[in-house]
Image: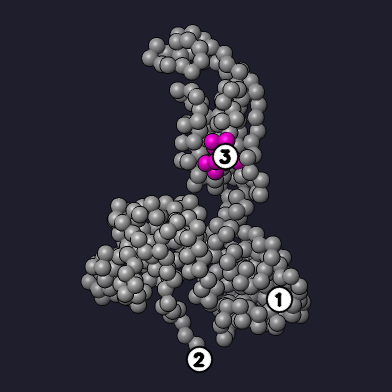
Amino acid sequence: MLLQDFVKALDSEASFTLQEGYDNSGIQIGNPFQEVKKALVCLDVTMEVVKEAQKKECDLILSHHPLIFQGLKRLSGETPAEAVVIDAIRSNIAIVAIHTNLDKVINGVNHTLGKELGLENLQILRPETGLLRKLATFVPLSHAEKVRAAVFAAGAGHIGDYDCCSFNLEGKGSFRAGENTNPFVGNTKELHYEEEVRIETIFPVYKQSEVLAALLQSHPYEEVAYDVYPLDNRLNKVGSGMIGDLPEPVSAMNFLDMVKNSLKTPFVKHTAPHRRNIQRVALCGGSGSFLISNAINSGADAFVTGDVKYHQFFDAMNKILLVDAGHYETEQFTTNLICDIVKKKIINFAVLISEANTNPVHYR
């Protein structure tokens, strides 16, 4: 399949428009129109991963972390990133990253981490705002059901766990068709009144092109009247971090042991264990220290993440059990998640998980 079609399939699961401004997810190396047949999935693109892709005859590397975060000024091979880029291009291996967009969707990186920690009732810790739009359109009574079904199928009408949500108000619309028109109802140059339905529904902004295309294709009018309004409502299925519950409360020390066992790590950094038991747990795979206050305000007993700075441990002390389990350790299950997404979205596409351990941090 074409590389651009592969990326489009990923986009339907975790839209690349959701990535943070500093991120560089998407195609890193490769022509959108080149054919790809076999992908190697990894957390980080290193030379070891490229060599593995060459050995296994993979023409695509699908990584969680981008190889290129900022523009490269030269390709001399002097830095690890430059060397990897040169070798990948020579081998005609495309590289795609799916990073913060996969972090932010409800069934993404943090959901996977939460399941590994045994949490239930998982929800987004800090939902996004400004990602919702309202569509209002005017449809003749005879075609209202067809138009509703089309925009729902394109991704509109979801509120929480409810779908096909809309508000419908019947009224009378008016228009006069010009001489160069072919009106669905009425005659040219004559004022016409038509019984119509005003249909209102909401959609996430990253679905706008699909929703509007479905509206225009299903609507019978030559010129479709519609409005799109920005909303400040929270989108509860997109955001940063997650929060959930353990089936039963456990002591702080037992919780720390459970985290180490679940993440297969010999050490975790943490604040002083407090006396109360742990049941409500917030988490964020990778670098999640920016969510410490959200975790505290949510009423969580513990917050598990990585890359916590020294002074940030003071911010959490006596308020929450803050656990720094490591960046790699909290994202290690992401390769399985990405592999599952590819298998789900693209039938009969070969996908392998890299055997390379790209964790740059070692313990002894």
Q: Residue at x 50, y 54 (%)?
A: 13
Using the image, determine if residue 274 lies above or below residue 235.
Answer: below
Which residue lies under the disc numbered 2? 364
Q: Which residues are magenta?
A: 149-157
Amino acid of disc 3: Phe
Rounded to the nearest angstrom, the CA distance separating label 1 from label 2 is 30 Å
Foreground tag (3 vs 2): 3
Mark 1: which amino acid? Asn
Left of 204 or right of it: where is 41? left
- In the figure, 105 relative to 83: above or below? above
Badge 3 is on which residue?
A: 152
Q: Secondary structure at mark 3?
A: helix
Q: Position of residue 106 (x, y in %)?
A: 58, 58
Instruction: Name the one closer to the observer, 185 or 73.
Output: 185
The residue located at (62%, 52%) in the rendering is: 236
- Crowding around mark 3 (Cα neighbors within 10 Å: few <14, some 14 to 19, many 20+) is many
